[in-house]
Amino acid sequence: MKKLKFILDYAKPDDKRIIAIFFDVAIYALAMLISPLILSIMVDNVIQGIPADNQMITAILQRLGGDAHLRNNLWIGSLLMLAVYILIAFGVHRRTINCGLVSETFAENIRNAVYDHMQKLPFAYHKQKDSGDLLQRCTSDIDQIRRFLASQISEMLYSILIVCFAAAILFSKHAKLAAISVVLLPLILIASLIFYTKSKKIFLDCDIAESKMMAVLQENLNAMRVVKAFHQEKVEIDKFEEKNEDYRVKLFRLVNALGIFWNISDLIGMIQILIMIIFGIQFAVAQQLSVGTFFVFLTYISMIIWPIRQLGRILADMGKVSVSVTRIKEILDEEAEDLEAGIKPEIIGDIVFDHVSFNYEDSEEHTLNDVSFHIEANTRVAIMGPTGSGKSSLIHLLNGIYDYKGGSIRIDGHELRTISKAWLRKKVQIVLQEPFLYSKTIYENIHLAASKSERDEIIKAAKTASIHNVIEEFEKGYDTEVGEKGVTLSGGQKQRLAIARSLLLKSPIVIFDDSLSALDSKTDAMIQDALNQLDYPVTTLMITHRINTARSADLILVLDHGKLIQSGTHETLIHEEGLYKRIYEIQSEGGESHGE
Ligand SMILES: Nc1ncnc2c1ncn2[C@@H]1O[C@H](COP(=O)(O)OP(=O)(O)OP(=O)(O)O)[C@@H](O)[C@H]1O
């Protein structure tokens, strides 16, 4: 019931639309039931001249000019049949449109709701979740419900109307033959229910096999660079073929099971029709049944068998819809981040870490352990340390992507947790090591977060990031498309574009997450000079493995295993026994240690 309410909440069908669907299905079912009746009247009462045993039929025949007139003008009967067929087409057409409107409205609303909600979920949620699974929930699961709304619900209604009315008409015409005509139908119903209950696992296996195949495909497309670099084409092809083969086998099992079910139910259905024909002929010979009524029996029984065979299918689909609703609800039930809650103070950029500790949800160990330091506003800080020492984790605490577990982080004296996340993320910019660029123009990519910026501000930011000259060399300059549709930028060019994008916001705190790593020393130095000459105060934090980048910093923080093991300036640290001095010595000898 809750799940139905969930579907209706998003489908938002108004009462008029629901009434219209009932009306369309009723017209369709009625017309389907009337057409064999007209044929039967034509055969019995018009062509054979047998008097009608029903007052209403007699009255209608008389209104149309009487049996003799109709016999001489058979086109009148044909015209009536045509009108009924037009009614059937009208009912089906209207039903498709109205059900389509409800199902498509549902799909659009739920897609928007899920997408909207996913944007507001914390980064930690996205990090934990498999993106392929999320994608499947947003596409296949929604489509499963959409298809059910588009066809199965009206089909169910149609089946109920047809089965009830056809059975009632048959029993009113010839109760004995009617009873004989439905004697095997419970068998078909039972076969259908058993089949769809038993085959649930086969359906599920198919879905799982398909999603595994899609996961390999998705991973392969994302990792194409690694595949090529390590010559893994053959391994990848084998991996895909294995999953594809598994999917084919599961699908074949399903097709096979479906084939067996359809054949068995076809056979029972045909035996049922045969039984009806044998008894019907006997009743006809005994003058207890007219040819027209016999024809009505034949048509109605075929019409009843189909919905009964389908019932199991509809129930199985209802099971799948229920699973899909649960999977979509799981996303929507996740608690969204309240980005606006909190204070919005002016920020200059004074940062204090006071005995800060942090660990990820899925990890018991401290990623950062009792880290304390003070960064004065408008200074430049280098963060160094071996890989996995906690550098990136530390900076992600600073813009509220993750929440610290112990201690206190204060920006300009304000406890970080009390500051609105939306506000904080405007004030603390992170330039990632591997920045993401949209498939848009260079201009739009830089312009992204600071939509109000003028063109000259964009050019100024690009100059500071030492990318302006490169952009100018492209034929379309700032209007050059990047990504899938356009030029491919080098790692260093992407980093510089991302730096320009971040600088445009003029945030008081800018963090470079090893985002100068793909630049040569000359460009690195040029950017640092430009940063020193910014016409507004900015506190800069740079994660780096290079002594050359760190040496001019006002403060160098050295992390190891989540602890702050050294802090000071280049001059003090090279005279102190420790990791910094070792890295310095190795890099001075000509090599570049990456802090290992
Ligand atoms: N999302 C996550 N969930 C669980 N553990 C994580 C997550 N991200 C990082 N870690 C773990 O936290 C520790 C610190 O990682 P972090 O990325 O902060 O190190 P780092 O110093 O920036 O390393 P690198 O120089 O290689 O980027 C590592 O042991 C890492 O495996």
Image: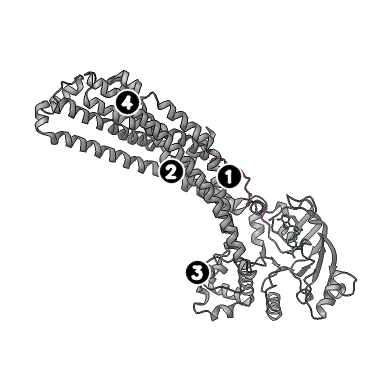
Is any part of residue 484 visible from this angle?
A: yes
Numbered disc in front, either 1 or 3: 3
Which one is earlier in the sequence, the residue at label 3 or at label 4? Answer: 4
Are the residues tagged 4 and 2 within 8 Å (C-beta)?
no
| Dot 4 alpha-carbon crowd within 10 angstroms: few under 14, some 14 to 19, many 20 or more | many
Report which quarter residue 524 is drawn in. bottom right
Which residues are drawn in magenta? 324-345
Question: Looking at the picture, how far across and down is residue 581, in whole percent?
Answer: 86, 73
| Dot 1 alpha-carbon crowd within 10 angstroms: few under 14, some 14 to 19, many 20 or more | some
Disc 2, SS: helix
Question: Looking at the picture, how far across and down is residue 289, in whole percent?
Answer: 24, 21
Structural distance between the alpha carbons of marks 1 and 3: 33 Å
Report which quarter residue 31 is drawn in. top left
Q: Which residue is mark 2?
A: 103
> What number is the disc on residue 332?
1
Disc 1, SS: helix
